[in-house]
């Protein structure tokens, strides 16, 4: 639920990037599959926001919360994969998300952000916040979300809906 207690209308996307086995995805030749799945997820978010925008007669965009717990330094060697995904997102879905908030970010996630930041547009940089384990205030300030709008594994109370691949990506409402 957005801060202030108003009813939740914006889709909330939760990605658990720290649980992704990038080495396995590369080793098994699944980068294209991962990219397609990510595009489908963004398209679904776009359509959900579009439908809500029409119903509410105002622009509604998704809030993306990335759980980076478990994201390690070894993940940094897969920058080409991440760059490809980021490039596709900014080319085809630049306005799907109102904010991107990385929570439970270890130092490796902050290092990654410093490396990918040059590939981002100024608007994308403005949309992104990197937060640590104590993220409630930053989440509220940056995304306008309360922690209880997130799934239980992030300290919230929201059920997972439309979970993808073992709950590694989910949409909550």
Image (cartoon, rainbow, N blue to C red):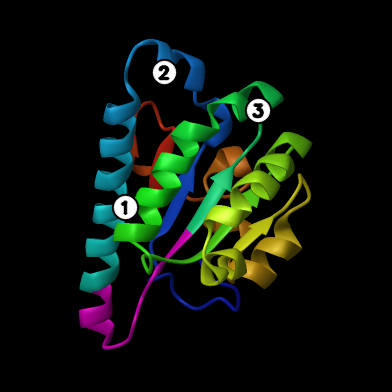
Q: Residues within 10 Å of mark 1 (few under 14, many from 20)?
A: some
Q: Earlier in the sequence, mark 2 or mark 3?
A: 2
Please provide percent x and percent y for residue 30. 32, 21
User: Residue beneath label 2, please?
Assistant: 26
What whole-number distance in Å separates the C-alpha atoms at marks 2 and 1?
A: 22 Å
With 22 as the anchor, is 133 left or right in this view?
right
What whole-number distance in Å separates the C-alpha atoms at marks 2 and 3?
A: 18 Å
User: Residue beneath label 3, please?
Assistant: 70
Q: Residue at x 73, y 45 (%)?
A: 110
With 171 as the anchor, is 53 left or right in this view?
left
Q: Earlier in the sequence, mark 1 or mark 3?
A: 1
With 12 as the anchor, is 140 left or right in this view?
right
- Magenta part of the protein: which range? 52-63
Q: Residue at x 38, y 65 (%)?
A: 94
Q: Are marks 2 and 3 in contact (CB under 8 Å)?
A: no
Q: Residue furthest front?
A: 118
Q: Secondary structure at mark 1?
A: helix
Q: Can residue 138 be seen here?
A: yes
Q: Quadrant of the C terminus?
A: bottom left
User: Residue beneath label 1, please?
Assistant: 42
What whole-number distance in Å separates the C-alpha atoms at marks 1 and 3?
A: 23 Å
Q: Which image quadrant is residue 33 in?
A: top left
The numbered dot on residue 151 is none
């Amino acid at each position: 639920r957005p801060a202030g207690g108003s009813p939740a209308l914006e889709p909330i996307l939760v990605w658990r990037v720290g649980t992704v086995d990038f080495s396995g995805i590369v080793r098994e030749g699944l980068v294209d599959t991962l990219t397609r799945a990510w595009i489908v997820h963004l398209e679904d978010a776009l359509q959900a926001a579009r439908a809500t925008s029409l119903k509410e007669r105002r622009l509604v965009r998704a809030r993306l919360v990335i759980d980076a717990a478990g994201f390690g330094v070894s993940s940094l060697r897969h920058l080409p994969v991440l760059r490809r995904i980021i490039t596709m997102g900014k080319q085809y879905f630049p306005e799907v998300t109102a904010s991107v908030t990385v929570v439970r970010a270890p130092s490796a996630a902050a290092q990654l952000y410093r490396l990918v930041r040059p590939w981002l547009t100024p608007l994308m940089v403005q949309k992104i916040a990197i937060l640590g384990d104590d993220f409630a205030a930053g989440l509220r300030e940056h995304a306008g979300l309360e922690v209880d709008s997130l799934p239980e594994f992030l300290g919230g109370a929201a059920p997972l809906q439309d979970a993808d691949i073992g709950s590694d990506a989910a949409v909550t409402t």
